[in-house]
Image (tube, grey):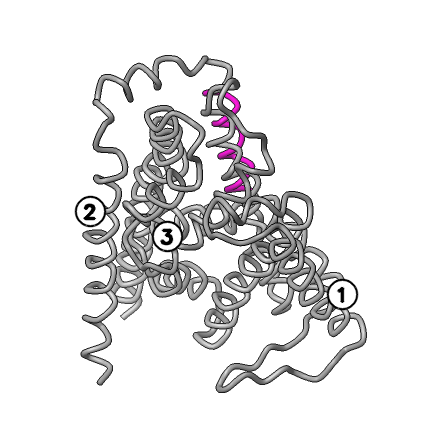
Amino acid sequence: MKRYLDYLWPVIGLAAIVFSFSLLLKEVRGISASDVVDSLKAISPLHYALAGVSTLIAYAALAWYDRIALLHLGKPLSWLFISLTSFTTYALSHNIGMSVFSGAMVRYRAYSSKGLSLTEIAVLVAFCSFTFAIGTLMLGGIVLVIEPEILQRIFAAPQWVGRSLGIGILVCVSLYMLGSALHFPPLTIGKFHIIYPRPAISLRQLMAGPIELMGAAGIIYFALPPEVNPGFLIVLGVFLASFSAALLSHAPGGLGVLEFVFIKAMPDAPQAQVLAALIVFRLFYLLIPLVAGIIVVIVFERQRLADALRARTSLIKSK
């Protein structure tokens, strides 16, 4: 059964790409390549620089995910090692898809070299995923309470539905914080057990998740022309919906899924300019980190191989 599941996720991801691209092509069939290129050229150097700063903020917060998880496990490591591991993990998993599984492999290679067990690494991966989830929920709830009409960009629903949904989400987040503060026993949902962390840890989660997501959304926000930019909260809300859909699709890099949902939810902005902003997002948040992440992996594995050869040589000489 497990062997079939190994093939299932790639098939789902490929199907999601094909389906999303077919919808995306219908959505943007009136856009020419020259329109997109002109839109990219129209982005000022300052806004490119601000998009770059937003990328750095997002990846710094992602490193904080790992740091918080390691503190939860009682396994503090150096910030440099955590940052390189986290950066490589997300640079590869965001592009490969199936982020939980692909990220787990990278983290295992790195953290096992520092003495973490397989069980501890599994807890770390799950904890980081939950940090992202709780951050997404909290930001989504805040956006829906302040800008309830954003739900109408994706679904045909009245504003009171959006605000009520936002309040409900924030209540759930508050219950999680209450469980942490009052040391509730683990919450069991089917086979999953949610162990409430210490309040200091859960507070860090509520800070790290939103910072990462706001940084990632900031890339698109700064790449959009001011005259068609609906404001940061709207861009953030649309990004949360499109990025979540991209992750759930298991498509590598959310290719096609992210673009389709985002463009569909921005009907008032010229599609060429929205597509150009999404290209900037892919370049800054996905492609450049992917190249850098591959370099880090090569250097790391080369160092591990060199250490293994030195240890073997020393063992032979000692005999």
Report, in whole angstroms, how far the alpha carbon at label 2 lies from the one at label 1: 46 Å
- Direction right: furthest residue: 182
Q: Residues within 10 Å of mark 2 (few under 14, many from 20)?
A: few
- Give the residues in magenta: 48-60
Q: Which amino acid lies under the numbered mark 1 shown in the image of this protein? A: Pro
Crowd band around label 3 with a 10 angstrom C-alpha radius: few (<14), some (14–19), many (20+): many
In the picture, which quadrant includes the C terminus? bottom left
Quickly name the residue at label 1: 199
> In the picture shown, does residue 96 fall above or below 126?
above
Secondary structure beneath dot 2 equals helix
Left/right of residue 149 with respect to residue 272 in the rendered view: right
The residue under label 3 is 246
Which residue is painted at 21% across and 63% down in the image?
10
* Mark in front: 2 vs 1: 2
Query: What amino acid is labelled 2 in the image?
Result: Ser
Q: Is residue 227 above or below residue 137?
A: above
